[in-house]
Image (tube, grey):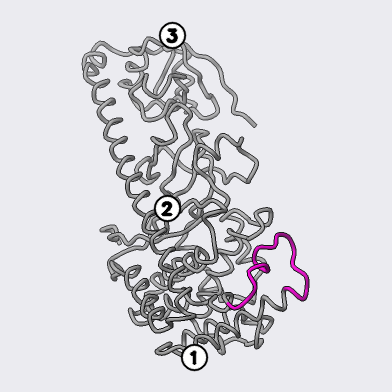
């Protein structure tokens, strides 16, 4: 339901009111055209824009500000005098915010390039497993080493969204996504470097058995027949056999390839293992594998949004997954995982791009604003804006197609990691 609004004269404005000045992006010095008035400075700036009226949101305004409007409080001459340079200062702040958004955008492009470069390497090493297995295993190790570069005790790992069309997405993207998600959980658990390396190799190779299956079984849309499911499930044992025949493949990696579809309650496959028979590294890869399959289902109509995928790990897989690891996963990815479309308290629509584990309620978001060209869309860190917060997760179909197109939302999503220095308070 749309918030109630009313037009109000700029002469009646008061600190604490939430208003929409209804001007284009380049016509005002504020970062957002909807704002809570914080000072008399801002009131004067709004008047200086030549506006006679603005749109007031009474329910989002401070009740005291509405009382002040009735009393027609005015700005003193002293306040007007002190505000002479305030407009210039606001324009400068806006330019600084734009520069910061540009740096975020450049970093996002860099991360997307890194993702696609790793995707190609995963594709090549998977192909090499057939005719040059030693090189394939070496290349897999190098890919993991590259991804782990920068991982230290004083870093946090951010997960970044990479939008992928259905043409871009492949089994190689799935392997890469599972690797990224697994390494992020492993880092949150403070696994030692050798275990992180083992985890990464296990994740990147977990589905190698699928190369031995007919491609048609993966291309098919809709539900698979019982016989097709049975064939598909053989990828675990086929993959384990391939890995066992390769030189220098750790037994822990083989364990994950064979058992990443096992569940703690013994209802998984191929051997119905239970509890401690499943290694911690295998449990991590299982969680990452399920999450990515939920978000990137081969049948787009079966795919779910990240928020629902997170909830599914808890609800549908109770007793099957390691609950402590699931909780680490959620703490790391935040309440609003990358790829989530959200509504902010100013009614803006935004796409969550990345989440900092140290401030999970304040992700980086890409804002929908038709006043700004899509290639210059504002990318902000909510942690830098105390007045902005997420109030709602939007489901598919709640936004018109033009919003999804503007935000560059595709059928599939990739995930890539970024190591950053921990905040001083940590």
The location of residue 47, given as percent across then percent down, is 36, 12
What residue span does the magenta drawing correspond to? 212-228
Q: Tell me if mark 1 has few (under 14), some (14-19) or many (20+) residues whose alpha carbon lies within 10 angstroms of its own.
A: few
- Front tag of 1 and 2: 1
Q: Earlier in the sequence, mark 1 or mark 2?
A: 1
Q: Quadrant of residue 403?
A: top right
Quarter of the image where one finds residue 102: top left
Q: Whole-percent x and y of residue 167?
A: 55, 53
Q: Nearer the viewer, residue 163 or 138?
A: 138
Q: Residue at x 29, y 57 (%)?
A: 423
Q: Quadrant of the C terminus?
A: bottom left
| Image location of residue 160, percent across then percent down | 42, 55
* SS at mark 1 in the image: loop
Q: Is residue 208 above or below residue 71?
A: below
Residue 245 tag number: 1
Sooner in the amino-acid sequence: mark 2 or mark 3: 3
Residue identifier under label 3: 52
- Residue farthest right in this picture: 226
How far apart marks 1 and 3 lie (CA) works out to: 78 Å
Q: Give the camera-side residue of 342 and 399.
A: 399
Binning the other alpha carbons within 10 Å of mark 2 as few (below 14), some (14 to 19) or many (20 upward) gives many
Q: How far apart are the two marked residues, 2 and 3, measured between alpha carbons?
A: 40 Å
Label disc, if present, on residue 354 of the rendered structure: 2
Binning the other alpha carbons within 10 Å of mark 3 as few (below 14), some (14 to 19) or many (20 upward) gives: few
- Residue 221 lies in the magenta stretch: yes
Q: Look at the numbered discs 1 and 2 and tell me whether their residues touch, using CB distance below 8 Å.
A: no
């Amino acid at each position: 339901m749309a918030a109630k609004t009313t037009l109000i004269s700029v002469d009646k404005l008061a600190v604490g009111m939430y208003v929409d000045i209804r001007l284009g992006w380049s016509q005002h010095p504020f970062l957002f055209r909807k704002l809570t008035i914080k000072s008399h400075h801002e009131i004067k700036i709004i008047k200086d824009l030549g506006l006679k009226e603005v749109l007031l949101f009474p329910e989002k305004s401070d009740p005291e500000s509405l009382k002040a409007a009735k009393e027609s409080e005015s700005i003193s001459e002293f306040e007007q005098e002190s505000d002479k340079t305030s407009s210039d200062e606001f324009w400068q702040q806006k330019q600084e915010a734009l520069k910061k958004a540009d740096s975020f955008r450049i970093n996002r492009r860099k991360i997307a390039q890194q993702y696609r470069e790793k995707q190609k390497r995963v594709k090549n090493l998977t192909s090499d497993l057939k005719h040059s297995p030693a090189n394939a295993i070496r290349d897999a190790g190098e890919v993991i080493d590259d991804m782990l570069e920068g991982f230290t005790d004083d870093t946090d790992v951010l997960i970044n969204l990479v939008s992928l069309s259905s043409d871009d997405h492949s089994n190689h993207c799935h392997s890469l996504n599972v690797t990224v998600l697994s390494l992020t959980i492993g880092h949150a658990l403070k696994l030692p470097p050798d275990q992180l390396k083992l985890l990464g190799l296990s994740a990147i190779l977990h589905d190698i058995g699928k190369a031995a299956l007919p491609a048609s079984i993966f291309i098919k849309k809709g539900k698979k027949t019982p016989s097709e499911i049975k064939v598909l499930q053989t990828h675990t044992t086929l993959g384990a056999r391939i890995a066992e025949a390769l030189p220098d493949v750790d037994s822990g990696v083989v364990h994950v390839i064979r058992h990443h579809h096992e569940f703690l309650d013994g209802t998984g496959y191929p051997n119905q293992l239970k509890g401690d028979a499943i290694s911690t590294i295998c449990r991590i890869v299982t969680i990452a594998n399920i999450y990515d399959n939920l978000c990137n289902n081969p049948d787009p109509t079966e795919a779910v949004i990240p928020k629902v995928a997170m909830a599914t790990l808890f609800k549908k897989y109770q007793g099957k997954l390691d609950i402590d690891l699931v909780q680490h996963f959620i703490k790391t990815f935040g309440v609003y995982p990358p790829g989530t479309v959200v509504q902010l308290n100013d009614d803006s629509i935004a796409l969550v791009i990345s989440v900092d584990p140290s401030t999970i309620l304040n992700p980086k978001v890409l804002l929908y604003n038709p006043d700004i060209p899509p290639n210059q869309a504002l990318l902000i860190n909510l942690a830098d804006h105390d007045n902005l917060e997420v109030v709602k997760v939007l489901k598919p179909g709640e936004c018109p197609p033009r919003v999804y197109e503007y935000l560059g939302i595709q059928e599939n999503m990739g995930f890539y990691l970024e190591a950053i220095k921990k905040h001083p308070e940590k």
